[in-house]
Image (cartoon, rainbow, N blue to C red):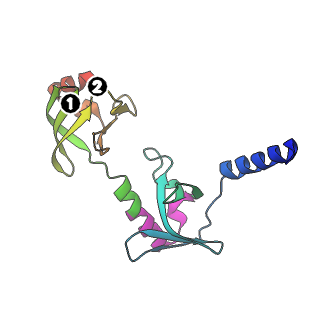
Amino acid sequence: MSDNRTLDMYEKRAEEMTATHIIPYEASFAQTEGGFLSLTLDGISYDRIKAVRLFPFSDVNRYISIREYENGREIGIIEDLSKMPEKTQELLSRQLDLCYFTPVISKIFKIKDKYGYAYFHVMTDKGECKFAINMGSNAVTKLSDTRLIIMDVDENRFEIRDVDRLTQKERRMLDLFL
């Protein structure tokens, strides 16, 4: 194969990989017998797909990436979930809620630092909870001056929406992470 044809082939592959495909509102989503999501689009059936929010904290119902489950290859993007048919909205919202389950921390009872891990005992909007984070990782992410996302060792996410709403004692416990 000549150098120009090889270069053209690589350029075409790169263009295909980086192209953005918008999923039309009439695309057919369904729930499989196993409880997974499937998609039929332009005559192609995808037996199992996953939905990923491209802006999970700032724009939760816009720009939803639909991907093949096995290899993560993007099939396309839903620009606005609220404009999809009601059944599709329900299916995708249920799937996204499972993927992005993030209890909100309302009270910190205790944070204990031991052997490179921080052990949290907190109250969330889903109930009382204990979890651990690795102190050597980037487990705490500041989304703003007052909003935090904490990822535990099992990759569960917890959110503190406003650090200023915590007591002074609770904020002191968080000082190590701010």
Identify the secondary structure beneath mark 1.
Answer: strand
Viewer-side residue, 76 vs 5: 5
Q: Which residue is mark 2?
A: 177
- Residue extending farthest bottom: 33
Cα–Cα span, label 2 and label 1: 10 Å
- Horizontal relation, residue 146 to residue 118: left or right: right
Observer-nearest of 173 and 34 = 34
Check contact, mark 2 vs mark 1: CB within 8 A. yes
Q: Which segment did they paint magenta?
A: 78-94
| Image quadrant in which the C terminus is located | top left
Badge 1 crowding class, 10 Å Cα cut-off, few under 14, some 14 to 19, many 20 or more, is some
76 up-or-down from 17: above or below: below
The amino acid beneath tag 2 is Phe
Q: Could you tell which of marks 2 and 1 lies nearer the N-terminus?
A: 1
Examine the residues drawn in magenta and state their main secondary structure. Answer: helix
- For residue 27, say whether it is visible: no
Q: Is residue 171 left or right of residue 178?
A: left
Q: Is residue 99 magenta?
A: no
Q: Position of residue 4 (x, y in %)?
A: 87, 43
Residue at left offset 63%, top offset 59%: 22
Q: Residue 118 shows which numbered tag?
A: 1
